[in-house]
Amino acid sequence: MWRARLAAVALHLVLLTGAFGVMWSLSCAAPAVWWLAPGLLVMFAATVAGVLRRWLRRDRYTWRSAIMPAIVAATVVAGTTGAPLTWRWAASEAAFDRVRATLPPTGPHRAVGVPAHIGWYGVSSADVYPGGYVFTAAGTDDLTDCGSGFAYLPGGPIDVAGDQFVRIHGAWYRWTCSS
């Protein structure tokens, strides 16, 4: 009996690991495919294994039978509502505000130095523009992606080589490049 429960707990932990990967991916300025695809694959495999395990053992359904569907449903609801980005940004916004307060005044475009981590986000660079500040998230400006991150734009979105800005909260935006 304890082995069956241990197997069920292990499947739930695997499913939660996949859900964490999906949530982490969706909490980035632009969804991080290297977390999203494996997370979805792990969630799918754990769910199939759980269903097959119940079916092959001909287990009766109890309240524990609802744990896996609840994890999947919570992940889908949170992912489709944008909750992961909202939660992670809420935990990081104050840190971004503190760093922004130390930056030089807005003006001609130039790069400025910032810490490698601000809040719960890695940051590879920051730029000053006439309309605000643009922070590039670490790992998003490599050969396969032209970048994404966050921007403080008190006057609203600015025209930066066709980049796309979506308001998060107040004067803060998430941005992705369009090229």
Image (cartoon, rainbow, N blue to C red):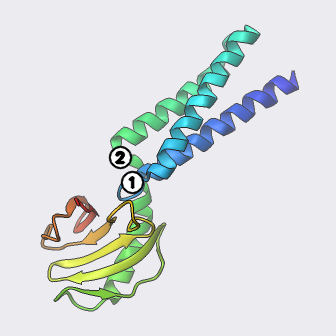
Between marks 2 and 1, how big is the CA–CA gap?
6 Å
In the displayed structure, would residue 150 be above or below residue 74? below
Name the residue rendered at 39%, 88% in the picture: 113
Q: Is residue 132 visible?
A: yes
Q: Can you give x and y, in whole percent of width and height, for residue 116 in the image?
A: 48, 78
Q: Which residue is mark 2?
A: 82
Q: Can you give x and y, in whole percent of width and height, for residue 106 in the image?
A: 19, 87
- The circle drawn on residue 85 is 1
Q: How many C-alpha atoms fall within 10 Å of the one at disc 2: few (<14), some, or many (≥20)?
A: few
Disc 2 marks a residue whose amino acid type is: Gly
Secondary-structure class at tag 2: loop
Q: Can you give x and y, in whole percent of width and height, for residue 127 in the image?
A: 28, 81
Residue 2 left/right relative to 168:
right
Q: How many marks?
A: 2
Secondary-structure class at tag 1: helix
Residue 45 left/right relative to 77:
right
Quadrant in the picture for residue 109 = bottom left
Q: Is residue 59 visible?
A: no
Name the residue rendered at 40%, 61% in the picture: 90
Disc 1 marks a residue whose amino acid type is: Leu
Q: Which quadrant would the N terminus be assigned to in this image?
A: top right
- The circle drawn on residue 118 is none
